[in-house]
Each structure stands twice: as C-alpha cells, then as structure tokens.
Image: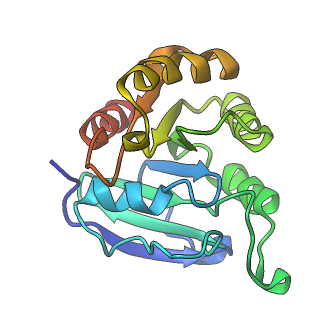
Amino acid sequence: MPFKNPRVVATSPDPAYWPAADLPEFLFAGKSNVGKSSLINALCGTKKLAYVGQTPGKTRMLNFYEVNEGIRLVDAPGYGYQKTDPKRNIDFGTLMERYFDLRSNLCKGILLLMDCRRDVSEDDRLMKQLADEFDIPLLVILTKTDKLNTTEKKRKPALIAKDLGIAESRVLLTSSAKKEGTDQVMQRMLAMK
C-alpha cells in the first residue's frame, strides 16, 4: 500500500526555503538517471509527484515531499551526469554538506539508489561514508531489477553488500516499471522512523 496524501512542500537549494525541522526525513541519493523520482512516485502510488525527465541530471536542488505517515522524502540531485547549463548547476557536495550540517538529526535513513546493472561507483562510496560519518542508517536500493534474470537477482545484492562492507539485508531489489519491491522499501523506512 503506497504512502498516503503525498505533497510537495519545498524545492530549493537554499536552506532558508526548506521546510521546518519538525519531521523525520529520508534522503534519496544516487547517480543521475538511477530512478530516484520513479521510486518516490511508486512509493506514493502516483506518476506525477516527483518529476521524471527524459534527460538525466535535471534535479539540481533538494525536493521535499511530505506524506501523511508523518515523514518527508527528500530527493537529492543525481551525481555523475550534468547535461545542463553549468551556471545553473548547484554543487552536489556543497548541497549535501548544507543538508547534513543542518538536518542530519532529522535524517532517519539514506536510500542509496543504484542501477542493478552497474558496479559501486566512487560517488556511491562517498554517500556510504557520509552515512557512516553522521551515523545514519543506509539502505541500498538496486533499481531496474526487471532487467536482470533470476540468477543475477540472487547474486547482485551479495556482491554490492560485500563491496560496500554492509550486511546483505541492507540491499533491496526494486523495479518501478514492474512495481516490485516498493512495499519492502516502505516497510524498512517506517521501521527506521
């Protein structure tokens, strides 16, 4: 069952425009075009909440979504791909530094999304380091798993967990296209709340 009554509450790189620090938050991070917006939409049972563009790298600020379970979903810009005007780009590192400096106490979990067909990148490792540094639970969400065969689906979580040095139970498989895995992701999030 999806999150109920989702709504956009803020979209800005500037902390002055972020919502009040009064609800637990879950940060969605990962490479551009990994499916962060698609997963947020799937978790909320809609196709229109988070913008899903045809061109990767469109999210350049933090997008805050609130659901009536009393939590916020925070969509971070994707790292790695920027096909936009460099003058309009917000430095990912600076934005994340601001977020964690001001809101790490609110962040109940980081959902690190990775394309199931790719290996762990240096940027993925840096997000894992941030989670460790701020003592925030990390869930690795492997997206687009409809592209894998059954054997690969069984093997991939263990490989990613070993590479990142985390328990395999912290790696979840999802496919927004097939609507698979979202219930498990939601249950884990609510358990961390």
* Above or below 55: residue 104: above
Closest to the observer, 72 or 176: 176
Q: Residue at x 53, y 14 (%)?
A: 167
Q: Residue at x 36, y 38 (%)?
A: 189
Q: Position of residue 42 (x, y in %)?
A: 30, 56
Closest to the observer, 14 or 22: 14
Numbered marks: total: 0
Residue sitting farthest toward the right: 87
Is residue 22 at all visible to an observer of this figure?
no
Q: Residue at x 43, y 35 (%)?
A: 148
Q: Quadrant of the C terminus?
A: top left
Residue sitting farthest toward the left: 1
User: How is this picture coloured?
Assistant: rainbow
Question: Is residue 4 found left or right of 67 in the rendered image?
Answer: left
Question: Is residue 151 found left or right of 45 in the rendered image?
Answer: right
Question: Is residue 131 found left or right of 107 in the rendered image?
Answer: right
Is residue 100 at all visible to an observer of this figure?
yes
Q: Position of residue 94 (x, y in %)?
A: 81, 61
* Above or below 76: residue 139: above
Q: Position of residue 6 (x, y in %)?
A: 28, 66
Q: Position of residue 152 (x, y in %)?
A: 46, 24
Q: Residue at x 53, y 15 (%)?
A: 158
* Above or below 188: residue 174: below
Q: Name the image quarter holding residue 95.
A: bottom right
Q: Name the image quarter holding residue 52.
A: bottom left
